[in-house]
Image: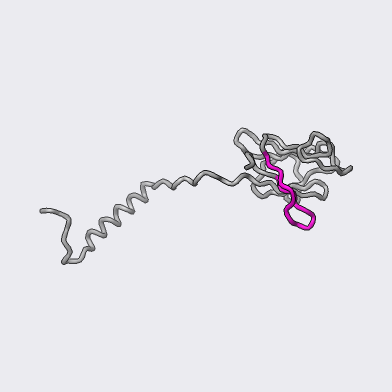
Amino acid sequence: MPRYGKVVVIRRNGVDGMVYPLNSTSCLFGRRTGCNIRMRLPWVSTEHCKIDINENKEAVLTNLSTVNPTQLNGAGFEQPVPLKHGDVLTIIDRSFRFEYPLQSTPKKRRSRSPKDETLQQVAEVELLHKQPSGAKSLDAS
């Protein structure tokens, strides 16, 4: 299971292609041999863009190409931008979808507010007062 998320190649026909798990805090896209996701197209920069995982485990996309800038969800960007689950980054005519890992921990239960507790107490009192006349009371007087 990917530690920080995954990058899914979106094929030209719109179908999901290869999946690249993000197991380290940086993922470099480009033409260079050392890139994590290598694109062997002449108009792709040697280092085109990168995804970094910050100290809060948030993915941040940085464009590194001035000639053919990376797009995020169809728009250009200048500064590093935090990624959301399902964001699509495009390099030239190749698209990739970023996905955070599924949460494997159970969701925390919502704590009761004082208002919820007061409403519960009012409901219990109303139930006691609505007992049928023939019903026995729990009071031992």
Q: Can residue 60 be found in the magenta stretch? A: no
Which residue is located at x 28 percent, y 56 percent? Answer: 124
Q: Position of residue 106 (x, y in %)?
A: 49, 46
Q: Position of residue 110 (x, y in %)?
A: 44, 47
Which residue is located at x 26 percent, y 59 percent? Answer: 126
Q: Position of residue 14 (x, y in %)?
A: 75, 57
Foreground pick, 117 / 94: 94
Residue 26 image-quadrant placement = top right
- Region rendered in magenta: 7-22
Residue 21 image-quadrant placement = top right
Which residue is located at x 16 percent, y 61 percent? Answer: 136
Q: How many marks?
A: 0
Relative to 134, 59 lies left or right? right
- Residue sitting at the far right: 42
Image coloring type:
one colour
**The N terminus lies in which quarter of the figure?**
top right
Q: Can residue 15 be found in the magenta stretch? A: yes
- Residue sitting at the far left: 141
Q: Position of residue 94 (x, y in %)?
A: 80, 49
* Magenta region, main secondary structure: strand
Relative to 120, 110 lies left or right? right
Q: Is residue 127 above or below residue 95?
A: below
Foreground pick, 109 / 7: 7
Q: Is residue 57 above or below residue 109?
A: above
Residue 41 image-quadrant placement = top right
Foreground pick, 101 / 138: 101
- Residue sitting at the far front: 1
Which residue is located at x 59 percent, y 46 percent? Answer: 102
Relative to 100, 38 lies left or right? right
